Amino acid sequence: MERKSGAVNVFFVLFIMAFIIITAVTVEFYYIFTVKEYIDTELSRALNIATDYAMLDEYRMEHISMIHIPTATAEFESYLHNEMKLNSSNERVEDGKVKYTLIIQNTDIQSSPASYQVSGVVRMKPILLSSLVPIDIDIPFKARARNQRFE
């Protein structure tokens, strides 16, 4: 019984193709995960800074947690554009390409007790397959900051 040499080559090519596909999918998921973690961390930081900066000091003596809403909103927007380097359309542009777009769909600010919450999606393109698969990936996010007093 003789082996046909072509059968081994087909299985080898199929193995290499499967390996490349699995590697590409793994890289894409890792990229999505790291961007999601970055967005969650930065939004949490932005909300905490905005809430802390907008605290009304005159109410602290009475142990009341109250913020000035326009100041909190302005500080949050300032953080998005100055620290996260988002443009006016909330897009992060690096090397002439849009890395991701931050779409804030819901904002909830309460003056007392001080609370600031945002939710929405991060829209991004795949990094390895963007030329082959022209899709956008939407990753939901939700971040919240509260200023609580414990007596």
Image (spheres, rainbow, N blue to C red):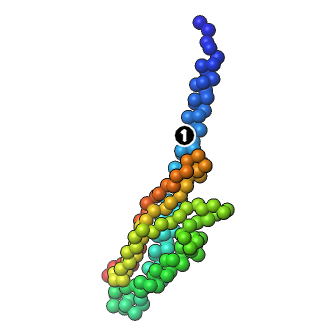
What x and y, as percent, mark residue 75? Answer: 50, 80
On-image quarter of the N terminus:
top right
Residue shown at 54% from the left, 40% from the top = 22
Question: Residue farthest to the right?
Answer: 95
**Who is closer to the viewer here, 23 or 139?**
139
| Residue 3 visible in image | yes
Depth check, front residue: 131 or 5: 131
Which residue is situated farthest in the front direction here? Answer: 134
- The number of discs equals 1
Query: Residue 80 at x, y = what percent?
Result: 53, 73
Q: Position of residue 138 (x, y in %)?
A: 47, 57
Q: Quadrant of residue 63?
A: bottom left
Badge 1 element: helix
* Residue at 36 percent of width and 83 percent of height: 111
Q: Residue furthest bottom?
A: 58
In-front residue for pair 94/62: 94
Give the side of residue 75 with respect to residue 57, left or right.
right
**Residue type, label 1:** Ile
* Left or right of 119 in this view: 131: right
| 60 and 118: which is toward the camera | 118
* Quadrant the C terminus occupies: bottom left
Q: Is residue 54 visible?
A: no
Q: Residues within 10 Å of mark 1 (few under 14, many from 20)?
A: few
Residue in view at x 37 percent, y 90 percent: 59
> In which image quadrant can residue 70 be found?
bottom left
Q: Look at 46% across and 85% down and name the residue there.
A: 71
Give above or below for 107 relative to 19: below
Residue at which label 1 appears: 22
Is 144 located above or below residue 54 in the figure? above
Determine whether 15 is above or below 21 in the image: above
> What residue occupies the far top of the structure in this picture?
1
Q: Position of residue 69 (x, y in %)?
A: 41, 84
